[in-house]
Image (cartoon, grey):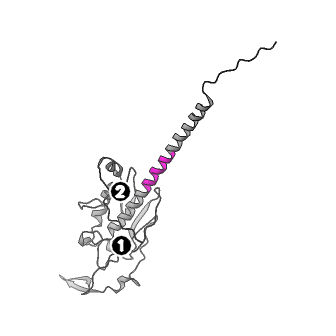
């Protein structure tokens, strides 16, 4: 007579096994969702930093800003892109074309100034696109004469890009805005990078918010 096989009793009920599997799947989904949320936050911070930097540079170096200004055309043409910024923009056909200049002699040297009754015009001309976090972003002025303007004594761009004593500079913007990642932002020939502490400050400093002057250009 054949011997009947002894039925083994399961160590875990079907219901508890299903609950265990479901729990593991939920934990996996949680981690994936968290990673996605963190990446999205970093990418948003990265784009805010780029837009804020362009807004900072769209300013008069002689009035608390950074760019050298005569008509304001150079300061108004800062752009951001994934390739070095082409210097092709001229005032022809723009509002800046009507701003008159004249040449005078000061101390035996020739100097170009605005004609009487004219004032500089500074406003952001170019919309800043969105960028991915893994992209290298270049920032520069698209004015055709940008290379000469960068050498002007009116310029305070070195103090902004290299972290001078001014209340606002690129390093401080990075600390204010970015979170837990390195950046590679190029302004002219300068490169700044570093670890960002914005998230830590938001966590331990109640009421802390990044101080920016960025206004979206429509």
Magenta part, dominant SS: helix
Cβ–Cβ under 8 Å for marks 2 and 1? no
Going from the N terminus, do you reach mark 2 or mark 1 first?
A: 1
Classify mark 2: helix, strand or loop.
helix
How far is the residue under mark 2 from the one under mark 1?
29 Å
* Residue sitting at the far right: 1
Q: Would you say residue 195 is visible in this rendering? A: no
Between 218 and 183, which is closer to the camera in this rendering?
A: 218
Q: Mark 2 points at which residue?
A: 177
The residues colored magenta run 32-43
Is 34 colored magenta in this rendering? yes
Question: Looking at the picture, does residue 210 appear above or below residue 12?
Answer: below
Q: Which residue is drawn at 27% across and 67% down?
A: 156
Estimate the x, y position of residue 178 in percent, counting from the top left. 37, 54
Position of 58 compared to 24: left or right?
left
| The one of 176 and 208 positioned closer to us in this rendering | 208
- Seen as rendered, the residue at the extreme front is 15
Which residue position is annotated with label 1?
147
């Amino acid at each position: 007579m054949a011997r009947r096989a002894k039925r083994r009793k399961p160590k875990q009920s079907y219901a508890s096994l299903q609950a265990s599997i479901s729990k593991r799947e939920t934990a996996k989904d949680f981690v994936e969702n968290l990673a996605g949320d963190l990446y999205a936050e970093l990418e948003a911070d990265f784009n805010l930093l780029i837009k804020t930097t362009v807004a900072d540079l769209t300013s008069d170096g002689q009035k608390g800003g950074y760019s050298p200004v005569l008509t304001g055309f150079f300061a108004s043409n800062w752009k951001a892109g994934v390739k070095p910024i082409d210097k092709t923009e001229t005032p022809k056909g723009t509002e800046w074309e009507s701003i008159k200049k004249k040449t005078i002699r000061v101390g035996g040297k020739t100097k170009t100034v605005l004609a009487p009754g004219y004032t500089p015009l500074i406003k952001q001309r170019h919309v800043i696109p969105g960028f991915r976090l893994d992209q290298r972003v270049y920032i520069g002025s698209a004015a055709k004469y940008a290379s000469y303007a960068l050498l002007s004594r009116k310029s305070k761009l070195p103090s902004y890009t290299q972290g001078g004593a001014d209340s606002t500079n690129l390093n401080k913007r990075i600390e204010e805005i970015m979170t837990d990642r390195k950046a590679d932002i190029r302004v002219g020939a300068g490169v700044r990078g570093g670890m960002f502490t914005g998230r830590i400050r938001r966590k331990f400093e109640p009421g802390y918010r990044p101080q920016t002057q960025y206004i979206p250009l429509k």
